[in-house]
Image: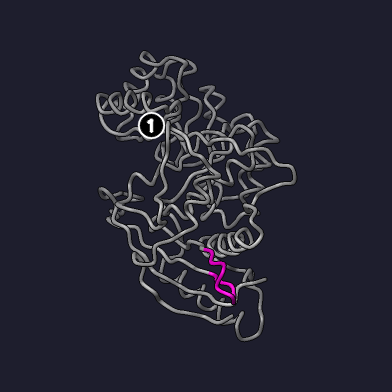
Amino acid sequence: MTASYAYLYRYSLPFTEPVTLRGRCLRQRDGVLLALKTGDGKHCAWGEIAPLAGLHRETTESAERQIIETLAMHRENGASLMTEGLFPSVRMGLEMAVMNLEASITGRHPFSAPRESALPRVPLNALLMGSTDAVLLRAQASYREGYRAFKLKVGKANAEEAAASVHALHRLFGGDIELRLDANQSMPLDDAISFARTLPKDSVTYIEEPLQQPRDIPEFHAKTGIRAALDETLWQNPGLLGALPPESIGALVLKPNCLGGVAAVLNMVRYAADHNMQAVFSSAFESGISLGFYALLAAATSPRPAACGLDTFRHLQGDLPAIPFHAEGGSLDAAGLYLDTQEVLTTNLSLASVWTL
């Protein structure tokens, strides 16, 4: 059984407070939802197409135009929905909808395997920002909730205070937590080395995108002993991963709607496993529809998933599924959340078009 109808909806969710990304101030999260429905009306599945300004090359408008063109070609001449040249966010949304529909029809989640045991819970990392006092308060509160992994934002402008925060966290928690830093490609090599040398030994697991020029990561690692994690580099310069010494990389941060679909993500997961790196699933401030899918993917690809960056739901006012995406004790019940996020409230959406396939 395949989809007989497709529906395109637009949504807009306000951020709890403005988000600044690559110098752009964003006040709301806009995106497009694709719903696929069977002819008998018994099964309906959702996929989210949500490029983010400052992160994706495509815009929400250009992504919507592309999915409309793809649906039109499929209806007119039977062309595959998974055509070449799709934007990463469009391919991810299409694959999500198609895989969710198959799961609804078969009664098995998209990544199930024969004789599969129960999926593991997926730990989250808590995001830390602001002054050292604010960082400590947030870290202590999150620790009491059950969080054991933390990510601290650091940049050239706040390097001194970030270093003070690392020292304070190390004194408070020692080795009881995993501390990651995220520099968002903000530092020149010399500044990054100077910053890293001020940190307590073995206090951080890795620094995510530490350098303005990621090709300098091997030198950074050689001079500091601190491994880097790759995020933006994975889609900005995908060929660089294979050129970097694996020992200099501690993690691959995987944003599926930037990488362009499930197959690309699974290739990254395998590469990480083969080279002693963490595979850290992350999101681009998407709704619970995507987060539920990503959490399931994280749980299905590792018996002990790395702490992931899927707590971005806290930055949105509301959600699209009838049961909002949520965490308990600093971790995610991936299987339960996947099921919860399959029912979507259309009252929060704006219907853009309807297609007979």
Q: Quadrant of residue 152?
A: top left
In the displayed structure, would residue 218 be above or below residue 77? above
| Rendered image coloring scheme | one colour
Q: Quadrant of residue 335?
A: top right
- Image quadrant for the C terminus? bottom right
- Furthest residue toward right: 114
Regarding mark 1 in the picture, which secondary structure is present there? strand
Query: Which stretch appears magenta?
Result: 36-45
Query: Residue 329 appears at what percent x and percent y?
Result: 42, 31
- Image quadrant for the N terminus? bottom right
Query: Residue 124 appears at what percent x and percent y?
Result: 46, 35
Question: 256 left or right of 143?
Answer: right
- Furthest residue toward bottom: 76
Q: Residues within 10 Å of mark 1 (few under 14, many from 20)?
A: many
Query: Residue 184 appears at what percent x and percent y?
Result: 42, 41
Magenta region includes residue 147: no
Relative to the observer, which residue lies in front, 98 or 221? 98
Relative to the observer, which residue lies in front, 292 or 284? 292
In the displayed structure, would residue 82 be above or below residue 180? below
Q: Quadrant of residue 168?
A: top left
* Residue beneath disc 1: 152
Q: What amino acid does circle 1 point to?
A: Leu
Relative to the observer, which residue lies in front, 299 or 339? 339
Question: 111 left or right of 334?
Answer: right
In the displayed structure, would residue 260 be above or below residue 330? below
Query: Residue 252 appears at what percent x and percent y?
Result: 56, 40
Q: Residue, x 35% and y 50% (percent of image)?
A: 21
